[in-house]
């Protein structure tokens, strides 16, 4: 409810010329007390040289209003995400299975590229490093494909 004395109270608060009758009225009227408490701040804000904030482009606001909320997009994309995770696990398991089943053949193939020690034996750390690098690069490639596909 607007008090008829509010304009006088606001003027007195902004010019710092409060009379005793204005102080008594502010003490008894909640609307004038609230107006008197914010009046100096509002006056400083009006006197400041800050430019008004830029308004967003109306076309952008309209476009955002037409989009579904993010929760809907997450619900729709959830099955695809679950299938991708399952495929990553299957590819990783299949790669490890191939490594386990064909270890001797892979070791012989990689030994042709690996350096040999003085006794003519192959350096096992090099072979193991190559296999781990191959497996991890495959999994990282699949993961990066998903991340980049989600961004686009």
Image (cartoon, rainbow, N blue to C red):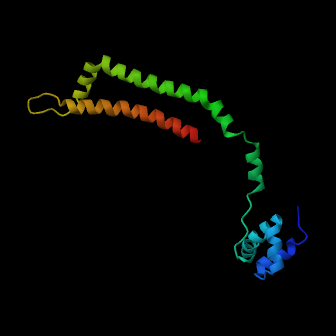
- Residue 97: in sight, yes or no? yes
Q: Residue at point 74% right, 70% down?
A: 37
Q: Residue 10 is drawn in which quadrant? A: bottom right
Q: Nearer the viewer, residue 12 or 21?
A: 21
The answer to whether residue 10 of the structure is visible from this angle is: no
- Residue 125: image quadrant is top left
Instruction: Looking at the picture, tell me which residue is in the foreground, 28 or 80.
Output: 28
Left or right position of 30 against 94:
right
Picture quadrant where residue 138 is located: top left
Q: Quadrant of the N terminus?
A: bottom right
Q: Residue 58, position in %: x, y? A: 78, 55
Viewer-proximal residue, 41 or 151? Answer: 41
Q: Is residue 109 left or right of residue 53?
A: left
Query: Which percent across, then down, holds residue 27?
Result: 79, 70
Q: Residue at x 83, y 75 (%)?
A: 9
Residue ID at (25%, 28%):
110
Q: 21 above or below 76?
A: below
In the visual, does 81 lie left or right of 4?
A: left
Q: Position of residue 61 (x, y in %)?
A: 75, 51
Instruction: Residue at 72% x, 75% y: name it.
Output: 44
- The residue furthest top is 101
């Amino acid at each position: 409810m607007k008090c008829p004395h509010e304009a006088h109270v606001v003027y007195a608060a902004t010019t710092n010329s409060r009379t005793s009758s204005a102080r008594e009225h502010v003490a008894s009227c909640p609307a004038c007390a609230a107006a008197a408490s914010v009046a100096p701040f509002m006056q400083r804000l009006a006197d400041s040289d800050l430019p008004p904030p830029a308004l967003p482009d109306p076309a952008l606001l309209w476009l955002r209003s037409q989009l579904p909320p993010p929760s809907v997009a997450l619900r729709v994309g959830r099955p695809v995400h679950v299938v991708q995770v399952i495929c990553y696990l299957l590819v990783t398991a299949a790669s490890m299975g191939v490594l386990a089943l064909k270890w001797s053949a892979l070791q012989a193939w990689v030994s042709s590229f690996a350096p040999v020690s003085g006794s003519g034996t192959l350096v096992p750390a090099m072979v193991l490093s190559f296999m781990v690098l191959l497996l991890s690069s495959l999994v990282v490639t699949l993961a990066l494909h998903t991340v980049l596909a989600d961004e686009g």
